[in-house]
Image (cartoon, rainbow, N blue to C red):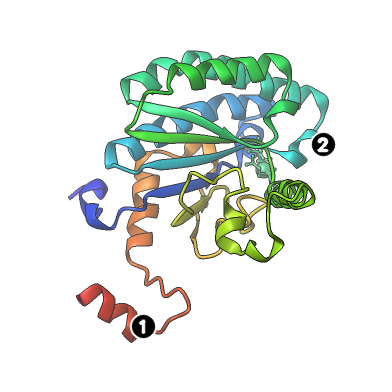
Amino acid sequence: MDLKEKIDPDKLPKHIAIIMDGNGRWAKSRGEMRVFGHQNGVESVRQTSTAAAELGVKFLTLYAFSTENWKRPKCEVDALMNLLVLTLNSELGTLMENNIRLRAIGDLTHLQPGCYSQLMETMEKTSNNNRMDLVLALNYSGRWEIAEAARRIAVEVAAGKLDPESINPDTFKEYLETREIPDPELLIRTSGENRVSNFLLWQIAYSELYFSAKLWPDFRKDDLYEAIIDYQNRERRFGMISEQIKQVTDK
Ligand code: IPE
Ligand code: IPE
Ligand code: MG
């Protein structure tokens, strides 16, 4: 029985988020420049996106560039931005064939103009696709997103448009980048690092975390299936006790 058949379609996560990490180490272990690792990571993006869409996952969020990644050497940042433009262009066919809509979260207006316009173009061309949303986190960080939400709320309160007493976790969520996207049930990080690196800090409050030792350019469909199977074997309690969860699922 192959791995895919072990997945229970009734317990599929609606939203999977992935911290794609390990491109640099993958390249270094082959005596290549870091950018070679980023280039090879594109195949993993293609495989993971098509596998998720085929399974029936509704949202796949990929951490592609963090706010902190600007601190990398300029040549690497430039190479990543160029690769993004090339990939958005070359992968349009894959997105259309698989009926995937491209979306993005992050401080997009501060991307380089060429990147921004290519991103907008690909999002526009895929905007009527409806099998799965592929959400790219670009110039994104969780703390930026939360601070930005607080700033937007403050502006509305100052203008008298929002009653401060009405602010609670549900209303706060409406000011986040992910306001139209459910929280991820499953967060995967590759490359053996056990940290979240400022990704979706608000949204992962109750996400199941899965750490894979694979470096991102080695990540394939079967690795995604393994993560989902692992997730499906866990009990999510949301603060309750096991007996209460069993009662709910037995009903
Ligand atoms: C992930 O791989 C890609 C980005 C962060 C853009 P890295 O470039 O972080 O690779 P490692 O972690 O240095 O191996
Ligand atoms: C997280 O990876 C960011 C992305 C995958 C885009 P990093 O490689 O930047 O994270 P740290 O620096 O190891 O925590
Ligand atoms: Mg890294």
Taking 95 as reference, is 222 above or below it? below
Tell me the residue at 55%/60% (across/down): 170
Whether residue 212 can be seen here: no
Under mark 2, the amino acid is Lys
Taking 201 as reference, is 178 above or below it? above
Residue in the foreground of this view, choosing between 171 and 7: 171
| Quarter assignment of residue 65 | top right
* Residue 64 in the image, given as x and y percentages of width and height: 60, 35
Label 2: which residue? Answer: 71
Whether residue 67 can be seen here: yes
Picture disc at residue 242: 1
Is label 2 in a helix, a strand or a loop?
helix
* Residue 201 in the image, given as x and y percentages of width and height: 63, 56
| Quarter assignment of residue 243 | bottom left
Taking 21 as reference, is 182 above or below it? below
Tell me the residue at 68%/13% (across/down): 114
Under mark 1, the amino acid is Ser
Quadrant for the C terminus in the image: bottom left
Mark before the other along the chain sequence, 1 or 2: 2
* Residue 73 in the image, given as x and y percentages of width and height: 82, 30
Picture disc at residue 227: none
